[in-house]
């Protein structure tokens, strides 16, 4: 990866420097490398650095500078390698520590703060480390610490433009448009576009995309060759759905040699948009992959409208334009759409009025509840709109998580083992610092835990003070009030006091599972072993009390399924059904298990309940021909003809194994709905595939005879 | 046109015998052992319940030895007549060393070359081999022959992972949905299409790269294709190879002299429908639909009279 290779330029430089002393020659080479780098000749600079490091393998400074070149050239892993090599030569090298902090910061890794602090212990005058700490604090919405760190940088270097840009950003984020800092910056360097670019970055991470875009435009206006800003402008324009201008900006970057991964990936994604189809109504714009559009639209569009209507009433806000929902069949496309890079763990992301999310076909069946994700993201649209995007991350995420289960208790995420462990280890954050858990997590599962905590905080407020209090808080945030200010105003207590009450409530709610977690884990293993041994009576006996210690556990190897299987083996079908109904109610999502429940319910003469069980799968894994056929049959038999038509249409939308029977089923449903022409069309399609298909022939004759009798 | 050919062959098949030989090889692990035997057992049960003039032999567990399979095929070679049909279905693990393919059996394995030699001695003109093991694509070159349909679970001998094709092949034999032309018979081609589609969906839904790609070859000289059709000239013989009959109506009618005229009329209408479908692209959509509907109605009336 380090082979940019410009042998010719190296040869030229080598011959010019041969006559100098080794020290002088090294200094000249370093100057040469820095000059080439400054002129954006990365390959030339790389070649000189390589020779320099080869000649001076024990000099950590050269490695650090070379690493910074890589960092600047979108190669953080190569950069980190050089920083580590520098640290191996000189432990606590401040430049190397700072380099690693910058690498971590670009990945929003919480270790960045620790590394920058460490660098400052070694070299308290390392201005760049203070600027980085200021940036990290501002990313966590900690305006006070950000200002303090920027001041420290300015104490060391009074003309540091980046430190001033931090102050300007603090002012802009606080809606002080006439900040004096930008004047001071431009007085020193009227083409310092990075000042606006930095502010653009903060606006974007605070979901204030329009303002972010405006600042990237300003950056480019005074520094037209600031390609990082062009790229970010393009990516954020795409986020808001301005695809044409986005493409133009990104192509401009590309043509000028700025070809980092987000630019490249986003251009590729824009090319793939020809594979999407867009449906518009007065309130919705739905963008679906062409291959699955016919299948998904009948489920997504009504659900989207239902969510928008519910939120309009609930939040008391009418949106001034349609919401665009983009559904990506390929998860990596969704990730690129979201952050310019593949590898994102999220399921959905909201950019103002544009929501991007995974399609159910982009995940393993049962991995995710698409309707829950949709409701989550659409809640963001309202909260962001109501607060003009001035809302702490914890609050908007908390509201979104709360709404998922408010619409249906079995939606949303269950209490997972990581959260239980975090509660046990007292790892939940104070509410005033909860944003940190989202933006700069310090351990791998902290983001998941922060979602849980934010949702529970909102649930706690709704329960103790009423839902209206959450809406009041939302409107307070619109005024740029901080979390402590809003809590004090609305809940009339200090955040610390709120934390105490909240944590006490969480402890009470989760006491059984937290106290019994270790015993439950041990018990689950025993139950699994008993099931493997076929000792069904013992499976039931051992799991009896354990199941309710941790009822939220519905993942693979859960107690409900062990118990249901055991009851079935003992020929106790009612008990087996009861276990699976509990599983479904609590939020179990395995499609095979839910289908099994439906089959048992049909056998037990409960077709209406079977239809309900299968209908849950429409919100989890609608990419399943068997599901739609079975559900269509159940609805048809129960005379729910509209629902049957939808299911039979879904069968046909996904290349059925048996097209003739699928057309015939739809024809039957159309006929019941008195849509005779549609029924006849479906019969012709059935018979086109299978001309000898007797039931279709019979119905076609009946329709024909009925027509003649008119 | 094709349908008429199929019906003719079905009528002939009614008087002929179909020999079925199913082999479930070594599983290696209890789980696979159970699965392979289970699938072979299911195939046997489906074939037996379908009735007809069928002779069914199934080898699984310790009985699935090369000697037993060889003896069975030698018996069939003596007994079968040219009008008869032979279907061999292999389930289990296979291997391919770059030259020859083998199915793993208790004791010595059976190679594709050995199997081909045994099949060549069987006089039955219509033969079907469904090799559902891993690496079964490696058997294609040895097994392919004129008048023989060869289906493999994998496209080559290098696809070595345990396969899921057999699971869906069994499903095809018992699922009426596999009978896509609704002629109450599941042909080898229909079962192949069904299983191939299900295999693809399986890997798609599991978000896994597909480790098997089923192939069909029935011209005797090709490498096999995943999507047999008139365009690639594969699948014609497979379409005419009835595997499981869901009803005996067609053959019963064919034997009833009173209804021969109606049957001839029906055949003619079916041919006209086939022709119309063939020319679909050349017609305006409304005209096509009108003509098709008229023919389908006529066919439905004829069928109604036949059924009375």
Image (cartoon, coloured by chain):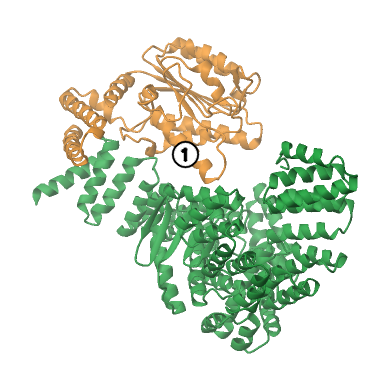
Can the viewer see residue A363? Answer: no
Q: Nearer the viewer, residue A343 or A683?
A: A343
Who's orange, chain-wise? B
Quadrant placement of the N terminus of chain A: top right
Q: Nearer the viewer, residue A384 or A517?
A: A384
Against A256, is A160 above or below? below
Q: Chain of mark 1?
A: B
SS type, badge 1: helix
Q: Is residue A215 left or right of residue A688?
A: right
Q: Quadrant of residue B16?
A: top left
Q: Nearer the viewer, residue A636 or B195?
A: B195
Q: Residue at x 26, y 27 (%)?
A: B252
In x, y percent, where is residue A688?
Answer: 26, 37
Q: Is residue A396 left or right of residue B185?
A: right
Q: Residue at x 52, y 73 (%)?
A: A384
Q: Residue at x 34, y 51 (%)?
A: A649
Who's green, chain-wise? A
Please name the residue that numbered disc 1 is placed on: B198
In x, y percent, where is residue A538?
Answer: 66, 55
In x, y percent, where is residue A377?
Answer: 51, 66
Q: How many marks?
A: 1
Q: Is residue A94 left or right of residue A531?
A: right
Q: Nearer the viewer, residue A447 or A686?
A: A447
In x, y percent, where is residue A366?
Answer: 53, 54
Classify mark 1: residues with Cα within 10 Å, few (<14), some (14-19) or many (20+): many
Can the viewer see residue B182? Answer: yes
Extreme residue in the bottom direction? A492
Q: Quadrant of residue B243?
A: top left
Against A90, is A172 above or below? below
């Amino acid at each position: 990866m380090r082979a940019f290779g410009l042998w010719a330029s190296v040869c030229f430089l080598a011959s010019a420097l041969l006559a100098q002393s080794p020290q002088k020659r090294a200094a000249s080479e370093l100057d040469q490398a820095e000059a080439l780098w400054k002129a954006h000749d990365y390959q030339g600079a790389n070649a000189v650095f390589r020779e320099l490091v080869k000649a001076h393998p024990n000099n950590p400074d050269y490695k650090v500078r070379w690493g910074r070149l890589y960092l600047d050239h979108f190669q953080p892993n190569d950069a980190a390698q050089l920083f580590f090599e520098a640290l191996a030569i000189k432990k606590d090298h401040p430049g190397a520590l700072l380099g690693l902090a910058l690498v971590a910061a670009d990945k929003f890794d919480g270790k960045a703060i620790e590394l920058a602090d460490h660098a400052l212990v070694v070299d308290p005058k390392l201005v760049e480390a203070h600027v980085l700490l200021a940036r990290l604090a501002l990313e966590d919405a900690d305006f006070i610490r950000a200002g303090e760190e920027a001041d420290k940088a300015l104490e060391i270097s009074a003309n540091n433009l980046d430190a001033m840009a931090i102050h300007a950003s603090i002012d802009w984020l606080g809606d002080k448009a006439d900040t004096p800092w930008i004047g001071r910056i431009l007085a020193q360097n009227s083409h310092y576009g990075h000042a606006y670019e930095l502010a653009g970055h903060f606006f974007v991470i605070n979901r204030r995309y329009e303002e972010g875009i405006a600042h990237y435009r300003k950056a480019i206006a005074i520094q037209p060759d600031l390609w990082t800003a062009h790229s970010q402008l393009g990516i954020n324009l795409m986020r808001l759905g301005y695809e044409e201008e986005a493409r133009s900006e990104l192509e401009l970057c590309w043509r000028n040699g700025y070809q980092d991964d987000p630019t490249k990936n986003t251009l590729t994604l824009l090319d793939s948009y020809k594979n999407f189809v867009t449906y518009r109504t007065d309130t919705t714009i739905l963008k679906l992959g062409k291959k699955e559009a016919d299948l998904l639209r009948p489920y997504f569009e009504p659900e989207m409208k239902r969510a928008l209507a519910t939120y309009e009433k609930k939040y008391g806000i009418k949106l001034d334009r349609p919401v665009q929902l983009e559904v990506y069949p390929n998860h990596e496309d969704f990730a690129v759409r979201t952050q310019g890079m593949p590898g994102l763990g999220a399921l959905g992301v909201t950019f103002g009025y544009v929501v991007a999310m995974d399609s159910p076909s982009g995940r393993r069946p049962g991995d995710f509840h698409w309707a829950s994700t949709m409701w989550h993201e659409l809640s963001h649209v309202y909260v962001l709109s109501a607060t003009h995007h001035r809302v702490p991350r914890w609050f908007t995420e908390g509201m979104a998580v709360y709404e998922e289960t408010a619409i249906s208790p079995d939606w949303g995420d269950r209490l997972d083992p990581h959260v239980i462990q975090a509660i046990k280890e007292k790892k939940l954050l104070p509410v005033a610092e909860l944003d940190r858990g989202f933006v700069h997590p310090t351990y791998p599962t902290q983001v998941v835990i922060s979602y849980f905590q934010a949702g529970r905080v909102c649930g706690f407020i709704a329960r103790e003070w009423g839902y209206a209090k959450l809406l009041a808080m939302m409107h307070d945030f619109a005024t740029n009030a901080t979390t402590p200010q809003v809590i004090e105003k609305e809940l009339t207590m200090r955040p610390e006091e709120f934390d105490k009450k909240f944590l006490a409530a969480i402890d009470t709610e989760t006491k059984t599972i937290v106290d019994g977690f270790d015993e439950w884990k041990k018990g689950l293993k025993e139950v699994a072993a008993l099931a493997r041994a076929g000792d069904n009576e013992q499976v039931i006996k051992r799991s009896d009390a354990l199941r309710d210690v941790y009822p939220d556990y519905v993942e693979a190897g859960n107690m409900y399924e062990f118990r249901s299987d055991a009851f079935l083996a003992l020929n106790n079908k009612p008990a087996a059904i009861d276990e699976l109904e509990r599983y479904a109610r609590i939020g179990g999502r395995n499609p095979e298990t839910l289908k099994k429940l439906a089959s048992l319910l049909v056998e037990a003469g409960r077709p209406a309940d079977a239809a309900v069980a299968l209908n849950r799968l429409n919100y989890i894994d609608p990419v399943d021909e068997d599901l739609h056929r079975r559900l269509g049959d159940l609805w048809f038999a129960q005379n729910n003809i509209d629902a049957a038509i939808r299911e039979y249409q879904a069968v046909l939308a996904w290349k059925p194994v048996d097209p003739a029977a699928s057309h015939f089923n739809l024809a039957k449903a159309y006929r019941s709905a008195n849509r005779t022409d549609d029924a006849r069309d479906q019969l012709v399609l059935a018979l086109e595939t299978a001309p000898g298909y007797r039931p279709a022939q019979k119905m076609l004759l009946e329709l024909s005879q009925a027509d003649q009798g008119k | 046109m094709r349908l008429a050919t199929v019906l003719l062959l079905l009528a002939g098949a009614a008087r002929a015998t179909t020999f079925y030989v199913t082999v479930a090889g070594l599983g290696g692990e209890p789980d696979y052992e159970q699965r392979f035997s289970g699938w072979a057992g299911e195939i046997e049960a489906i074939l037996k319940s379908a009735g007809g003039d069928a002779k069914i032999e199934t080898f699984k567990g310790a009985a699935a030895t090369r000697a037993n399979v060889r003896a069975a095929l030698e018996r069939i070679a003596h007994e079968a007549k040219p009008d008869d049909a032979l279907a061999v279905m292999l389930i289990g693990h296979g291997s391919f060393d770059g030259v020859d393919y083998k199915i793993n059996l208790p004791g010595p394995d059976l190679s594709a070359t050995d199997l081909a030699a045994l099949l060549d001695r069987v006089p039955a003109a219509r033969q079907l081999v469904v090799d559902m093991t891993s690496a079964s694509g490696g058997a294609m070159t040895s097994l392919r022959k004129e008048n023989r349909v060869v289906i493999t679970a994998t496209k080559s001998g290098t696809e070595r992972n345990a396969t899921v094709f057999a699971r869906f092949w069994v499903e095809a034999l018992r699922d009426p949905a596999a009978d896509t032309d609704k002629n109450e018979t599941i042909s080898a081609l229909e079962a192949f299409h069904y299983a191939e589609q299900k295999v693809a969906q399986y890997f798609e839904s599991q978000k896994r790269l597909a480790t098997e790609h089923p192939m069909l070859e029935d011209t005797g000289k090709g490498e096999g294709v995943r999507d047999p059709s008139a365009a690639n000239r594969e699948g014609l013989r497979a379409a005419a190879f009835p595997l499981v009959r869901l009803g005996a109506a067609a053959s019963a009618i064919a034997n009833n002299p009173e209804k021969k005229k109606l049957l001839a009329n029906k055949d003619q209408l079916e041919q006209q429908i086939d022709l119309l479908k063939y020319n679909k692209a050349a017609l305006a959509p409304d005209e096509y639909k009108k003509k098709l509907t008229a023919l389908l109605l006529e066919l439905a009336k004829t069928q109604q009279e036949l059924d009375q």
